[in-house]
Image: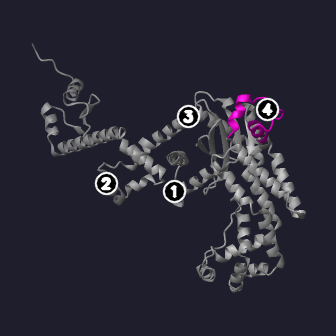
Amino acid sequence: MPKVKVSLSSQLNNYVSEFGPEVFSTDGKILYCKICDIKCGSAKRFNVTQHLTTGKHMKLVAQREKNVNIKKAQQHFLTDTKKSCFNKDLCSAMLSANIPLNKLNNESFKSFLVKYTGKIIPAVTTLRKGYVDEIYDETLIKIRNAVIDKKIWVSIDETTDSLGRFVANVIIGTLETDTPGKTFLLNSEVLPKVNNSTIAKLFDDSMHILWPEGVRHNDVLLYLSDAAPYMVKSGNAIKIFYPKVIHVTCIVHGLHRIAEKIRGHYSKVDKIISNVKKIFLKAPSRVIIFKSTAPDLSLPPEPIITRWGTWVKAACYYCDHHETLKSIVNSLDKEEAISIKNAQKYFSDPSLAANLVFIKSNFGFIPDVMTNLEAKNIPLSDAIKLIEDVFFKLNLVPGTVGKMIQEKMNDVLEKNKGYQTLVQISKILSGEETSMVRISENLSLGDLAYFKYAPINSVDVERSFSIFKVLLADNRKSFQFENLKKHLIFQCNNQVEEVESSEEVSR
């Protein structure tokens, strides 16, 4: 029987089948070597096998096999590291201690870890891609578990970061009937702009993060913010969907506004504090003169307007050390700096000393009250007593200044409708009040019992911003916000856990 002539296309396809599609391919007309990236002779089978034994082809085959083995090893390593408790604990420790993950690229640090742990240190990308998200997700799960069947309070504040972004943080805490609740940083977002709408949306979005399977609107009883007009408006918007919410503006912010009113009235005191601060700022030679004259006296404080109570505290310092400070400033050459010249002028004003005495005598207690109100786990009744004590003392301040500050205090408290509601609830809890007239009908009798340890300040949000500013250091400006947020939320909540654990041990 005569041989049937095989077509070219069939012959080429037979070569592909015989030697493998990973080696050859064909379009039915030519045979193409994928490894060498060239057309291969195919007139006879000998031509094909001869090509396979050429030095170039064999070298490229060996290189390909090496690459395949490396890839398999990498995949195996990634599979193993996903199960590695060491890698996860290492990542958690670095995030908690605010150690940038890229420090693992430092050979000395890496060698230290290898030497004392005996472990293979993972690549930075392994931790970033394989563990940061997992640790963040676990943090959210812990928060969700902590608020199961709990009543909560929510606090929101915003700041402008060093890159000019409007960053808002959302703090939540549990409300308990017989013990202080737990506090968590739930969310941090960049807002396109700051107004009542964006704040209200952030509030609602955060509640959906907390309760992804369905928001428990009736479990949110308290909303804390500062007294900015857009925050007050956001409170009204939030009450539409969260009917039981009482909106309280931070009482410590209120006391700070009273302190600012005091500062605004005593302009000469403000100017002496400002100028003396400039005299010793970045001036080591003048600091030496100061310390040699008054070795046991700390340098003049540097009050920051946005830090609560620091100006009043500085005024008290100037009252206590007026003569010493005046002597040191007068010993300096007024031609050296305009701040020295101005400070000498104000120290020569006879009314300065009297004003300092009046401030310390009548308002010097305010910073201590602020500090006491900032304390964690303070009962609502104790916080209200502190405010009532401030109100009582300010009403004793004589003269036109006293009247001005009393009016400011009244204005702060009258505008804070939520605080007035908490005062009545506190009196009901202590048995001083039996009327329920001013209590919202949306609140049940059972809800009132959860206000025993309700906070009246937004200090926890301010603390979270302090951690945020440390995270966003000058050498970490390229930190993508979504990653920064995960680091921040884990770090803040991990610190809270450590504090609570230490308190339990001490008890």
Q: Which is more N-terminal, label 3 or label 1? A: 3
Q: Which is more N-terminal, label 3 or label 2? A: 2
Query: Which residue position holds label 3?
Result: 144
Q: CA distance from mark 2 to mark 1?
A: 29 Å
Where is residue 496 drawn, in percent x and y? 54, 46
Query: Which residue position holds label 1?
Result: 476
Identity of the amino acid at label 4? Answer: Ser
Q: CA distance from mark 2 to mark 3?
A: 37 Å
Query: Which residue position holds label 2?
Result: 116
Q: Which mark is residue 203?
A: none
Where is residue 506 drawn, in percent x and y? 51, 49
Q: Answer few, some or many: residues within 10 Å of disc 4's Cα (few below 14, many 20 plus, some between 14 and 19).
A: few
> Is disc 3 placed on a helix, strand or loop?
helix
Where is residue 206 drawn, in percent x and y? 62, 37
- Is residue 308 in view from this perspective? no
Q: Which mark is residue 440?
A: 4
User: Where are the magenta residues, as a range?
Assistant: 423-452
The residue shown at (12%, 17%) is 3
Q: Answer few, some or many: residues within 10 Å of disc 1's Cα (few below 14, many 20 plus, some between 14 and 19).
A: few
Q: Which is more N-terminal, label 4 or label 3? A: 3
> Is disc 4 placed on a helix, strand or loop?
loop
* Residue nearest the observer in this picture, 327 or 131: 327
Q: Are marks 1 and 4 in contact (CB under 8 Å)?
A: no
